Every structure is written in structure tokens, then in C-alpha cells.
Amino acid sequence: MVITKKAVDSEICKEKINSLLSKLHIEPIDISLYILAFIHRSIVNERNDFAPQHNERLEFLWDAVLELVITHMLFRDYPEKQEWEMTDMRSALVRGRNLAEVAKKLDFQEYLYLGKWEEKSGGRENDYILANTVESFIWALYLDKWFSNAEEFIVNNVYSTLPRILEEKLFKDFKTLLQELTQADRDITPYYEVVSESWPDHDKNFLVWVFLKTEKIWEWTWTSKKKAQESAAENAFKSLTN
């Protein structure tokens, strides 16, 4: 199907995203914000007639609301926990892999607008893209309906994953786990190197490699150095323990 208008003005796009919002019991004020949340940069790069922006403009803002809500809920619900324990729990909740699972549960992959190459390469199942979409959606909801509505979405769809995280012990910091593993097995401390930075200063991606001495054991790309390191450590740890 060829969309000749800008996506945010297209009735086809509005109808598609409205069907998702209806399932989530969200009545939008500005539907264009939610459409933007599902526009991946790949389609903008391929087709400048499709949309003037992609969802990473929204994703840039996501940390503040998501982390505030999660921090408040943990502080309220776990008065017996120490600060470092709640920090680990929060990290697990906002980690890319967990947000990608949230996206899949909500069928967000069905609503993505991807370029042809990204579509062919499996972009709809890409955890990085799916996590970014959840982040962008939260900010679209915040900008459209303000804090209480964004908070409700986070509590119902992100914070609600905490019982599974606790049961499966997914709350541990993977950088720490990887360090403990490699020091015990090889007496080596892993280190992280930012190999490249791409896109303009306001819209960067960081490629991070994890090394054991001179051996690269994993790499990951994300929009912040911290998240790239955490995700690289998680995948490196799982690859070494499987």
C-alpha cells in the first residue's frame, strides 16, 4: 500500500494507530504524536515524503517519566529494600529487553512503519527497535494526555512485569554479573569501549564493544553509552553461560 501523504496527515495511518489506542483504552487528543511513536528512522531515510521526523525525537525524552514512575512505585511498595536493591530492580524494569517484551505483548510490532531494508532484515522482531518504540509511545502519551495517563500506562504494562523479574532473578546488574563471572573463570575484568558514534549530536547512536583483554566478546548499539554497555553486558553474560 502506497501512502502519498505525510503519515501524520494520512487517514490510513490515523485509523491504524487509533485501532491500537482503542485496545489500550486511550482516547487521543493529538493522534499525530502516537503515529510518530511508530515511525522508525529507516522509512524516513528511504522516503522523505512519508514523514518529516521519526520516533527518536520522542525517545530522547523518555527517561524522565518512566524512571520517575518506576522509582516512586518501588519506593512505595518495597519499604524494606535498600537503595541498591531498588536500583537493580529499576534497571531490570527499564532494560531494553524487558521493554521489548512489553512491546510484543501489546503487539506494537504490528504498527511499526519501517523502511524496506529494515523490514526484510527482521526489524519488527528487533528488541532494540521495539524497546525504542515503547519509550517513544510513553512520551507521546505524556505529551498528549499528561502525567497521570503516562503513569497509568507504565504501571499497567511495565511495572506489572516486576513479579516475573523477581521470580526469574532478572533484577541483577549484568555488568556486575559479567564481571563476577569473568573474574571467577578467567581472572579478567571486562572493559567497554565506545567504538563509534553515529548521527548528529542531538540524535546519536553509540556502538559499544565488550572486551576481555584483547578479545571482543560482544557488541551493542543504543542511544546512550550507559544503555549500550548494559545491553552488551547482558548479552555477553548470557552467551558465556549458555
Image: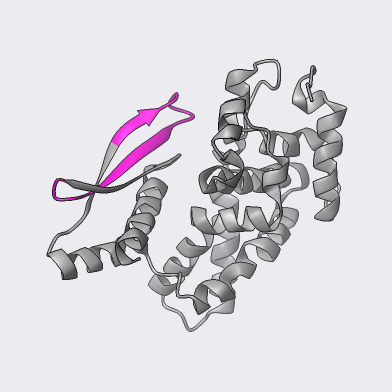
Q: Is residue 192 above or below residue 69?
A: above
Q: Residue 113's image quarter?
A: top right
Q: Is residue 163 above or below residue 238?
A: below
Q: Give the residue drawn at x 32%, y 31%.
A: 196
Give percent across and percent down for residue 220. 38, 44
Identify the coloring.
one colour
Q: Is 181 situated left or right of 130 in this image?
A: left
Task: Tell me the magenta residue range.
Answer: 195-214
Number of on-image labels: 0
Q: Residue 111's image quarter?
A: top right
Give percent across and percent down for residue 223. 45, 39
Q: Is 222 situated left or right of 191 in this image?
A: right
Give percent across and percent down for residue 102. 63, 58
Q: Give the residue drawn at x 42%, y 74%.
A: 85
* Nearer the observer, 167 or 144: 167
Give percent across and percent down for residue 74. 55, 71
Q: Residue 235's image quarter?
A: bottom left
The quarter of the image holding the N terminus is: top right
Q: Give the residue drawn at x 77%, y 33%.
A: 32
Q: Give the residue drawn at x 46%, y 80%.
A: 81
The quarter of the image holding the C terminus is: bottom left
Q: Is residue 215 magenta?
A: no
Q: Is 99 situated left or right of 106 in this image?
A: left
Q: Residue furthest front?
A: 120
Dominant secondary structure, magenta: strand
Q: Is residue 198 magenta?
A: yes
Q: Is residue 97 above or below residue 196?
A: below
* Nearer the observer, 124 or 52: 124
